[in-house]
Structure formats: C-alpha cells, structure tokens
C-alpha cells in the first residue's frame, strides 16, 4: 500500500476541533508541546484556541489547524504504525505537512504560522475581505469573471483550484458580491462564501510572502524525509528542503494548485489518502483527481478503527 497524508486548510475549522481529538499518547504529547509554544509566543491559550470566538481570528484558526494536523499525523505514525509515502497540505495545512516531511520542527511550524496569521490579518485589516467558492464553472470562465468584476479599489483573484469546476476566489467583500451575481449569470451550479476573514493566495499577500521567506531563511536545513506536494505548482518535491520552504513562503501570494497535486498523487500510485482532521473536504475532492486512490477522513473517528479499515 502507498499512503498519502492530507492536511486541510482554512475554512475547515470548527469549534472544539482540538478538544474532540481522540486521546492517545502521541496526541497528548503534541497538545502539551503546542501549549508551551503558544505560551512562549503570546498566542491564545491552547484551551481557548478552538472556541467559536477565538476562531474568528485568522491567526488562531491557522494555529489550530496545524496543531490538529500534526497531532493526528503523529498518532497515525507513533500510535498505529501508519507512515506516509507522500504528504500534501492545503494552504496553511502545508506547514503541518512540512513537519511530517521532516523539513520543519513542530515548534518552528507554530512560530512561523503565528507570524503568517498575524501578518495576513494586518494586511487585510483596513477593509472587508474574504473568499468564496464557485462550483460548476471552469478556470477560463472564472478567470474572465475576475477580470470583469475587479476594479482598482475592489480586487478579485483566483486563490485555489480544487477541481476543474471548483475554484475559490479571494477579494474584497464588494468584489465577492459582484462575483456571486456574475457567476450565477454564467451558469454556476453554486456559490458559497467561505468562513475566512482574509484574502489568501493572491497578490495582496506579497509582503507576507517576503516576510515568511525572511523568517524561513533562518530555519536550519534538514534532510527531507517524505515527498511533499507543492501548493505553488502541484508537483512532487523530494529530497529538497529548500524547495519546500520556498513553497511555504511564496504560496500565500499565489493560487493553490490542489487539483494538480492530487492528480500527481494518483499518478504516483497512492492506494490510500488519509485526511487529517477537521472535516472531510479534501477526502471528498480526491475522487475527481485520483479515482483509484481511496480517500479516508479521520474526522470524528477513533483512529484505531480507521486504521483497521485501512489495513483490510
């Protein structure tokens, strides 16, 4: 069997996501480690990090997602002996993937994600920003749509290509409202505003990418242990920690090529793809890109039962 670990990004969060992780030695140790890092960096206390109120802040959401992803992955590897052949993280989930790949320590990932979330909030602090998903239109139509509704004051950009007909946009609240109307006019099957308070993966975040690159330049280089799927290009990176760190920094200002990354996982022969909590969105997206790869979501499950089903 060939296994990919998938780590979700912003929009997948929900209240209580850390408190509902199953009890296990690896998860307990990871949460204890996270609590120490959060205390040291002055972030929200771990016990309050996944409350509904706290998750309104982008920085808290991103930290909670990375903690959940790393805790679940460690439980699979340390408690159950399931080791990944590939890792892929959607947006901020890539930082959890980089920990599993051996490129970042958990402490480093939390510190840089704390910085990332803080900077993204600051960049978007002067207006109303957000993200929305268009279902039922192709990339060409959505690109035309963004050109039609964008103005100097109200920008709109493609942020994620999750499937050929599921594309996420970033922009101002005004531009997103225009996009909803335009998408329906073009025949979109569905429009959905996402629970995200910033405009991610667009040129607005170029200053954030530059700051992240500067921070990551100081991270010790370690041998990459597990192949990593790039957000920027949707391609496999192996044996190249420098390229992984570059992807982590730059992807905040560029679209996530998730569909391409999942196609590569299928082409490389992954038999199973296990999504870390919370949610099931990545598992649900997988069949379009890699129909021969079996998706498994850990969400709401006792990990041992999932592992037993995976091994059958």
Image (tube, helix red, strand yellow):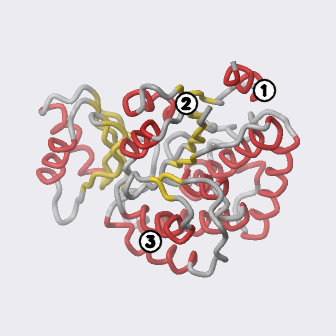
Which residue is farthest right?
A: 25
Q: Which residue is labeled 3 in the image?
A: 209
**Residue 271, numbered label:** 2
Q: Position of residue 52 (x, y in %)?
A: 62, 42
Q: Nearer the viewer, mark 1 or mark 2?
A: 2
Q: Residue at x 23, y 51 (%)?
A: 175
Locate residue 25, reporting x and y percent. Answer: 88, 42
Tag on residue 240? none
Tell me the SS state at disc 2: loop
Residue that badge 1 annotates:
304
- Identify whether 133 is placed above or below 39: above
Residue at 85% across, 45% down:
28
* Residue 149 horizontal/vertical position (percent): 15, 51
Q: Are the residues flagged by discs 1 and 2 in contact, CB closer than 8 Å? A: no
**Upstream in sequence: badge 3 or badge 1:** 3
Label 1 neighbour load within 10 Å: few <14, some 14-19, many 20+: some
| Of the two numbered discs 3 and 1 in the rendering, the one whose residue sits closer to the viewer | 1
């Amino acid at each position: 069997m060939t296994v990919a670990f998938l780590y979700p990004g912003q929009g997948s969060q929900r209240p209580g996501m850390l408190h509902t992780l199953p009890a296990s030695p690896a998860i307990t140790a990871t949460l204890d480690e996270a609590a120490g890092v959060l205390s040291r960096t002055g972030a929200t206390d771990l016990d309050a990090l996944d409350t509904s109120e706290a998750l309104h802040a982008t920085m808290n959401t991103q930290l909670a997602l990375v903690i959940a992803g790393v805790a679940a992955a460690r439980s699979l590897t340390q408690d159950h002996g399931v080791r990944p052949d590939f890792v892929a993280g959607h947006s901020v989930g890539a930082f959890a993937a980089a920990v599993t790949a051996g490129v970042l320590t958990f402490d480093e990932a939390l510190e840089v994600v704390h910085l990332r979330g803080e900077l993204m909030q600051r960049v978007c602090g002067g207006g109303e920003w957000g993200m929305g998903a268009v279902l039922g239109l192709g990339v060409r139509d959505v690109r035309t749509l963004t050109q039609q509704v964008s103005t100097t004051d109200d920008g709109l950009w493609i942020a994620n290509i999750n499937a050929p007909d599921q594309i996420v946009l970033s922009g101002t609240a005004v531009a997103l409202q225009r996009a909803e109307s335009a998408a329906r006019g073009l025949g979109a099957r569905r429009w959905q505003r996402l629970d995200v308070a910033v405009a991610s993966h667009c040129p607005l975040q170029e200053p954030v990418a530059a700051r992240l690159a500067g921070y990551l330049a100081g991270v010790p280089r370690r041998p990459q242990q597990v192949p990593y799927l790039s957000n920027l290009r949707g391609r496999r990176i192996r044996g190249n920690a420098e390229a992984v760190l570059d992807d982590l920094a730059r992807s905040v200002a560029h679209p996530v090529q998730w569909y391409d990354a999942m196609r590569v996982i299928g082409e490389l022969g992954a038999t199973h793809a296990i999504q870390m909590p919370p949610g099931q969105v990545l598992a649900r997206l997988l069949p379009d890109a890699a129909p021969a790869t079996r998706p498994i979501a850990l969400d709401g499950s006792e990990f041992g039962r999932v592992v037993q089903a995976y091994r059958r």
